[in-house]
Amino acid sequence: MKVKDTNKRINHYKEKFKVCFNQYFEPQKKNLVLPLVFILIFYGIALFLRIKTGNNFYLLNFIYIGTALGTGLFLTTSLKRNYSGWGRRIPQLLIGTYMLLFIGVWMKENIQIEGFFFYIFSGIFTGSVLHYIIAKVAGPVVFNRGWCGWACWTAMVLDILPWKNPEKGRVRTLEKFRYASFLISLILVIIVWFALGPERLSILDNHVLYWLITGNLTYYVLGIFLAFFLKDNRAFCKYFCPVSVIMKLTSHFSLLKVAIHKRKCTECGLCEKNCPMNIKLMEYKKQGTRILSTECILCCTCVDICPEKAIHMTFKYDRGFKEYLNYSESKVIEKYNGENK
Ligand code: SF4
Ligand code: SF4
């Protein structure tokens, strides 16, 4: 009698799990390919650096990041449309908090762009330099500006804000400010570096937390202010982030890009309307190319929202220097635009 009851209960829970699973997931074997490629790349880097340096930190660091990314990629393609956004949010939160709190605050590495400049000037090769090389200089040749969509600790906070869909488009005039912010960071580091003279190495030691916290707080305050003012979560990324200046150079050549299936697409425009970076997807479709814009952060919003499932990630070599972006026509914002159109 007891065995019968236990079997009944097990079947009941099996059934419940199945219903629950089917409500959230629609996994397919082909969805495993991209996550596995990413996991292999990151595990390979982990092993290579462990063997080269003898440092276990690299092993743990890249296995953690690779696993978070691989899991996120798998969830993005396997969760049902209403929930697939979590596939990106989970690694974004896991990697963003890990980088900021563990590498930055706990291990006292200045992972802000100023820290990168300081380490380069000092000739000291640290985790921060490696991070910039992999995520922001060489990495975009493979995975585009995936850093911005999937791992950035600044965007991890900005993506929580309510203005996910910047309907008014981009403000062309404000775009110049990110180049200014890049130069300000570089000039600030040069001035401090030379002004400090023989004391300069203290900046990489005693003052790391000061630079890290001040820099991040500035980004968060400015990012939230801009998002609120322009009703656009990603306004900071479009107009002020100095890191995007570096990534835009190499992401031209990215192997991983979003593509629109010509025949499946009905040109309903939903993808374009919802792109957080205001990319004109339909224009790229007309040109018969993949989404070549260096503004694409591979967030997969367009992939998830397309009712025809006509948008997908593709991996091949091409490049293009033409940016098709939606600029604002709003009267409120036009005053910033000047000659805009
Ligand atoms: S543009 Fe800058 S702030 Fe935005 S996601 Fe990329 S690195 Fe982060
Ligand atoms: S084109 Fe698609 S993947 Fe790229 S930023 Fe826009 S919505 Fe995200």
Image: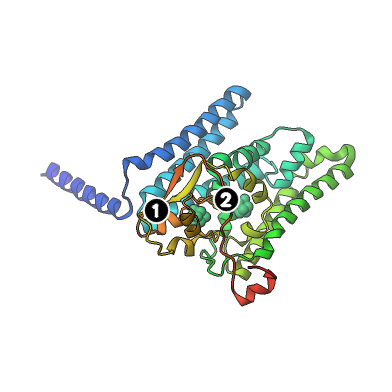
Amino acid type at circle 2 is Cys
- Between the residue at mark 2 and the residue at mark 1, the CA separation in whole angstroms equals 27 Å
| Residue 255 x %, y % | 51, 41
Q: Residues within 10 Å of mark 2 (few under 14, many from 20)?
A: many
Q: Is residue 267 left or right of residue 251?
A: left
| Residue 246 x %, y % | 67, 46
Q: Is residue 31 left or right of residue 208?
A: left
Tell me the SS state at disc 1.
loop
Q: Vertical placement of 172 versus 74: above or below?
A: below
Residue located 58% across and 31% down the image: 58
Labels 2 and 1: the sequence-earlier one: 2
Give me the disc on residue 109.
Answer: none
Give the total number of marks visible in the rendering: 2
- The verdict on label 2 being within 8 Å of ligand 1 is yes
Which residue position holds label 2? 148
Specify the quadrant that holds the C terminus: bottom right
Residue located 68% across and 63% down the image: 174
Foreground residue among 127 and 231: 231
Judged from this view, the residue extending furthest toward the front is: 287
Foreground residue among 178 and 162: 178
Tell me the SS state at disc 2.
helix
Query: Does residue 214 appear anywhere in the picture?
Result: no
| Residue 34 x %, y % | 43, 40
